Amino acid sequence: MEQFAGFAIPGVPYGCTYAIVAVGLVLTYQATGVFNFAFAAQAYMSAFVFTLLTEHEHMPVLLAFFLSVVVLAPVVGLAMDRFLFRKIPNTNTTAKVVTGLSLLVGIPALLPVLFGNENLYNTPSLVFNPNVVYFHLFGSPINGIYMSTIIVTAAVLVAVVALMRFTNLGLQMRGAVESRRLVQLDGVNAGGVVAVAWAISSFLAGLAGVLLAPIYAQLQAQDYITLMVGAIAAAAWGVLRSMPIAALVSILIGVADTVAQGYLPTGSVLYSAVLPSLPFIVLVLALLFVPGMRSLDDAKDPLSSVDPPLPPRITASRVPQLDRIIRVLWYALLAGFVVSMLTWMPQNWENVFNSGLAFATIFLSITLITGMGGQLSLSQATLAGVGAFTAAQLANHLGLSMLVGGIVGAALAAVVAVVLALLSLRLKGLGLALMTLAAALFFDNTIFSQTSITNGQVGLALHHNWATPLNLINSNGHEFFIVAMVVIVVCVLVILQVRKGTVGMYLAAMRGSETASSGIGINLTWQKISIFALSGAVAGVGGTLLAIQQTVANSSQFNYQLSLAFVVIVITTGVGTVEGAIQAGISFVVMQQLLTYLPARFGGTSLVFVLFAFGAMNYAAHPEGILEFQKRRWTTRFERLLFKDKDAGSGLNPGGPTVPVSAAPGGVVVPGSSGGDYV
Amino acid sequence: MATMSDTSGSDTSGSGATGAEGGVFSGPGWPRMEPRLIGNPDPLLLVRGVSKWFGGVQAVQDVSLTVERGESVGLVGPNGAGKTTLFNCVCGQLQHESGSIEFDGVELDRLPTFKRARLGIGRTYQRVEVFSDMTVYDHLMVSERARMGTGRMWKDLLNLSSPTPEERSRVGAVLDLVGLADKADVPVSALGLGMCRLVELARALVGEPILLMADEPSSGLDVHETRELASVLRTLQHERGMAVLLVEHDLGMVGEVVDRAVVMDLGQVIADGPFDTVMANPEVRNAYLGVSA
């Protein structure tokens, strides 16, 4: 018993680090209706600025705390509310998740661009001295960091619960979560109430960030994101509503972790692979067994009918003459691209475009799963990795060509996707996003971390004979380009055929209303499994292509952060169309290449992610994607210019056989429809 | 809002619509009910002692009811009586805790919703459920395909999924019937609430249900449209032998459409019988009006 206590007690303060984040997440969800994926980024931002001010500018700790937590954090929270989340209808879960993810990707990438790419170490402790052991609990030393974490967590928990339960402001916050518009009709300044909620929750994020920073030797966003996922697991057991349960489960996770560390043999697989995944396993269990997590998105804004509907896709509504012209131009552009790649294109740019084609193939899997299937998956890079590592291992051990291995890899990725689909059958929206995120993290920590599978940080370097009979590696790139083009054309044809066929209709119905879809005889389970499998296979093929193009299969190419970034990138350009995915893939690599011409401080992938993240923030205003929005805009202009005398539909007036959405007489949006939810 | 098809007529007496004379039901796209179903003495829908709890609230308490083949039954009662919950239990969108449900001789209790639909249960919803990305025509086509369960990815990949002439004919017939033919290519997001209810009805009808379960179909419709809807429902019952289970607050419409009424209050059936008799029942009057006999 004493030994158990000796292992368990250190888990309490460790669990409190999860608890303070979990309480902040629950508060944000309860008070704003947004599951704030950006919470970790906000915490990291405050810690970053705090450390910068104290360590580099030598500012007093309290003043730095005031600026980074009391001022900066709430201001950023207010800005997030004012410019982003306020524009998103309550019922549009996808837009809220994507906007949160774009901030999670964008803020940590933006900070080095703004303040310089310096490593930050030794963040000072806010209250107690981290190097002093204040007392021993059952023989376990409690130092300053743990002291402050426990005390602040308890204080925050009491204060926030009291705010939500016993104050008028808390009552108004809970009402505004259901429907801002409805509480406004009761005379409540809903905008102000929600803004206060954002300020409070952002202050909490900043406080958590600064409080926990001394735990880490070096300040890195990655640590905060991992911490947040553990906190999500705890919050999930409280159905994102109960702060005391979230705090309790956080502490239990901490205790379970330290107890397991104490009892498990250090050299075992359980210790090295499963233990780091404990929070993700807890999250998966919560998603599977806590009934409330299956109905997170069931709440409907009673006034959702005032949200405008999305306009129909521009390709379905532009005048036929312009449609023909655009198709011809596309074919001409494609032919020009192919000829250029095979003739005069400089080799470095040919490599860039080849890499873009590989990314585009992975991105097409997002078009399938999210654009067509309406399922928000945050594990597409993981599925790509399954394909890539399978192909590389088959080449390494059996001498199988990567191209053949890629097919096996695609099949295995499809199987993994099917397992994920089976686990997620009863989930949708936020619940599904969390399940797929947990799966991606599980793979990162348990599968892709195994040296026998991925060869560790070095990765599996590809050899020439792995890509026989074609010379795909280290050549002038032509062979790879041709193979990649064939693959992408096949993938596009498959997607287009499925979309216009019966399964495409079933998926469109499923996106509109799962209730009505099953009510007319559609087997939702089968449709979900099918689209997950197809999407997984396409991702697996894309991952193999990427590994061949980069001549290495490395776990850093397929980690969960890239899964998040990929979703943000594709949704920025347009998740509903295949050209959106292709242009996302090409522009992703072209922008990286262009940034190499800028001074080093602005170069690299950081700014690419920042740019795409800012693009994704437009998702709230243009849920059809920037590409689709711009297409609509320019189509309208061209139609006015070229066909002004024609009495036909246009980008803004999708006529022809259809009635203009915005001009429909009494054009009421269907209650219960997804409103602005494009995917 | 467009009026419904002339074939469904302005005959609002409830004594049979003129739709059949227009040929809608006699064409190849709209087969009549099979004789074996009409002559079958067993009830079409048999609900026995069904109960459903939501936490501490018993929404449906030991409810039993039957719907005969080709019969039109009104399920009425005040708000919160458990009518929609019972609908959801029959369709499989909710799982009841006790009791059993049989449809056309098949035990439904373990069947998922989509299989129940394929048995011949059509459904419209209290809160409109339409597919926001689709046109009216697509709504009906997807329902037609779903009923047959013919959607296969390999068929799509081999380009074998184009609508057949029979499918087009059936969809066209239903669009004509409910008066939506001129709106076939309109996205439902451009339609008003009343139109969307008609789209829901058409979507249910194209699956050629043996039993149509309509949940407050007149909500959002004006008086004229409600009368025409009643006429269509009556026509479907008389001419095609389709059974109708109707939840509706517009008792005037219920009176026009149904042969029999079942009244629920607080999760229980409190009356069952001919509409006029049931409405005169003191317990029913008390439930509706709060006045005792």
Image: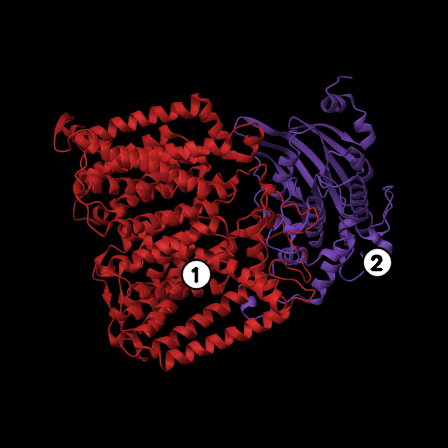
Chain colours: A red, B purple
Point out which mark residue B23 bears: 2
Is A230 left or right of B157, judged from the image as shown? left
Question: Residue at coordinates 60% horizontally, 63% vertically from top-left?
Answer: A316
Q: Which residue is mark 1?
A: A365
| Residue A434 image-quadrant placement | top left
Quadrant into which the N terminus of chain A falls: top left
Percent coordinates x, y for residue B154 in the rendering = 53, 67
- Tell me which residue sits at (55%, 75%) in the image: A328
- Label 2: chain letter: B
Examine the rendered structure and indicate whether residue A246 appears above or below residue A229: above
**Label annotation for residue A70:** none
Q: Using a 10 Å C-alpha cutoff, classify the residue at mark 1 as few (fewer than 14 neighbours), some (14 to 19) or many (20 or more).
A: many
Marks 1, 2: nearer the viewer? 1
Crowding at mark 2 (Cα within 10 Å: few <14, some 14-19, many 20+)? few
Q: Pointer 1 indicates a residue of which chain?
A: A
Query: Foreground: B28 or A671?
Result: A671
Both labels 1 and 2 in a single chain = no
Amino acid type for the residue under numbered disc 2: Gly
Q: Quadrant of residue B64?
A: top right
- Residue at 51% from the left image edge and 30% from the top image edge: A189
Q: Secondary structure at mark 2?
A: loop
Where A472 sits versus A139, above or below? below
Q: Is residue A294 left or right of residue A386?
A: right
Looking at the picture, tell me which residue is in the foreground, A303 or A468: A303
Which amino acid lies under the numbered mark 1 shown in the image of this protein? Ser
**Residue at 22%, 50% in the rendered image:** A269
